[in-house]
Image (cartoon, coloured by chain):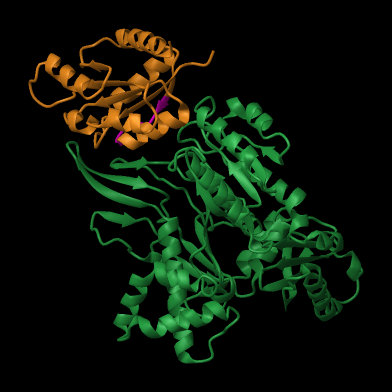
Chain colours: A orange, B green
Amino acid sequence: MDAPRIVLGVIGADCHSVGNKILDAYFTEAGFHVVNLGVMVSQDEFLDAAVESNAGAILVSSLYGHGLIDCEGLRQKAVERGLDKILLYAGGNLVVGKTPFEEIERKFKAMGFDRVFSPHDDLADAVKMLREDLEARKS
Amino acid sequence: MEPKLLLSVDIGSTYTKGGLFLLEGEELRPAGREVVPTTVDDLGRGFARVREAVLARHFRFLGAGHAAAADIPVYWSSSARGGLKIAAVGLTPDLTLSVARMAATSAGGKVVRAFSYELTAEDLAALKAVDPDIILFTGGTDGGNSRVVLHNAAKLAELASPAIVLYAGNRKVRDQVVDILRGRDVATAANVMPEVGTIDIEPAREVIRRVFLERIVDGKGLSSVVEAAGRDPLPTPLAVFELVRTIADRVPGWEDFALIDMGGATTDFYSHTRSFHGGDAIILRGLLEPTLKRTVEGDLGLRVSAEALFRSEAAFLEGRLRDAGSDLAPLRSYVEDVSRRTEHLPADDEGRRFDRLLAAACVRAAALRHAGITQRVFTPQGGFQVQRGKDLRQVRRLIGSGGYLAGVTGPDILLEVCAPGADDPDTRHLVPDAPACYADADYLIPLLGNLAADYPAAAARAAVAGLKPLTSRTS
């Protein structure tokens, strides 16, 4: 069986590249086929890559606090581009300030993201969830 | 070692050029050239005429000791009646379709139409109307999208067209695609984009070249020439493309250069230079373009395409005319005139001035389209430059080839490539800075391109030696 494909990148005008490399290595090691777009990735670049590679999930990172505005509309655009079943994950320092994580999670889920991660989450959990979610989407 | 004679012929759309070369050890020396009008109804006649002319006027002066005229090997190329017409089919416009365009142009073809996503009935009608020689069919990374690819395969199976379908998309469904297209003329090559952002156009290029030889030569009326020459032709732009590569590989100081071939119908831009140089505060977005790149601009030309040029470059032309105290009206009537009389050569100062202006517009626009840009962006981590497309700033030398550019006496027109282009102070076009300029005054480039496969080092050195340096003093 082919390794499940996922698209990875840091969205918007965000140049934080260290976490991106760690995620790439970790998910590759965990058996995923990672299409890593690096830093400063636009919504369209995420979607083009997902269309071409037939990815099951897009993992969006944002470290600089502008994640909310950068991620707005990604779900609708994905649906418009025919990616109606794709999983959308977001993680990082998604907003500036002391907003409680539950509040951030609620906002991102309202925007159509399936999972939202804080800087304190364990990557092993994320891998487990991703496997389960991909499996669930298949049926 | 006994010196050896080689004959090289290029059948262009207007002229058929022939050149005799003397190969002594590792050196090729031009030993005479002739030009005759291309005989469009039967290309073989023009070929025979130029061959006879070259041999009659130059061969006998070379003295004894050479092989008989009939034994001189003949190499040749043809722009094959307006070139190799390729329709590109891809999935997303910025990824596989964009790579398919690169593959087509670097194989010496001209992209006549391009399609993304699912092909529709309307697209099929458009495909049929442009009557391409090859449909370059791509889409999906290896193991990636197959749904749209299989849909498009089924649509192409319905298409009533003699075009050869070259499949260079998602490898996972290659067999299925071939199966769906059974009964059609199908060829396959490795995926042009096996991974998002990874470009692999060489295999598709090679298949296009082979397809050109095996199946298209005949349709273009070239088979009589194959018989006379005893050798297969190269498409002219491919001969030039390979010569550019050979010069960059073989001639010291020519690692970073560009070549513009401007004709009546198209302007071709070739560059050999690394696409992206990296650095601390610069980020590449989009595809990493190849070191050797060719673009073909079908709306930039001095005659057949003069009206299209006039429309697309109106703002630039108007600005230059205004600076000279004039307006667009006289140029407009000149353009209308020469686009009908495509053989016209200007007889007066005004006509020469207009041709010069149109040539400047072609060179400038072709460079701006070939080159990428950087944009300054401000982020919470500070200012960054975002690069898209190819960086030509390291290009140190620039060659002008083709009718008009072969005849220029100064570098001014070629230096139009240094156009700033952008009005926005935060956007910079990555055009060459101040390249040294040269003219291919004796049209040796395509002729030596034909010899580059068999005699790479000698052809590359002879091409550079045959160039005329253009310094500002002579303009």
Q: Is residue A31 above or below residue B102?
A: above
Residue A32 is situated, as x and y percent measured from the top left of the image, at: 44, 16
Q: Main secondary structure of the magenta part?
A: loop
Q: Is residue A88 visible?
A: yes
Looking at the image, which is closer to me, B84 or B25? B84
Q: Is residue B392 above or below residue B265?
A: above
Q: Over which residues does the magenta segment extend?
A: A35-42
Q: Image quarter for residue B156?
A: top right
Toward the left, the furthest residue is: A98
Identity of the residue drawn at 40% across and 85% down: B330
Residue B73 is situated, as x and y percent measured from the top left of the image, at: 83, 62
Identity of the residue drawn at 55% across and 38% down: B138
A36 left or right of B36? left
Q: Is residue B182 above or below residue B464?
A: above
Looking at the image, which is closer to me, B118 or B234? B118
Toward the bottom, the furthest residue is: B348
A121 left or right of B105? left
Q: Image quarter for residue B42?
A: bottom right
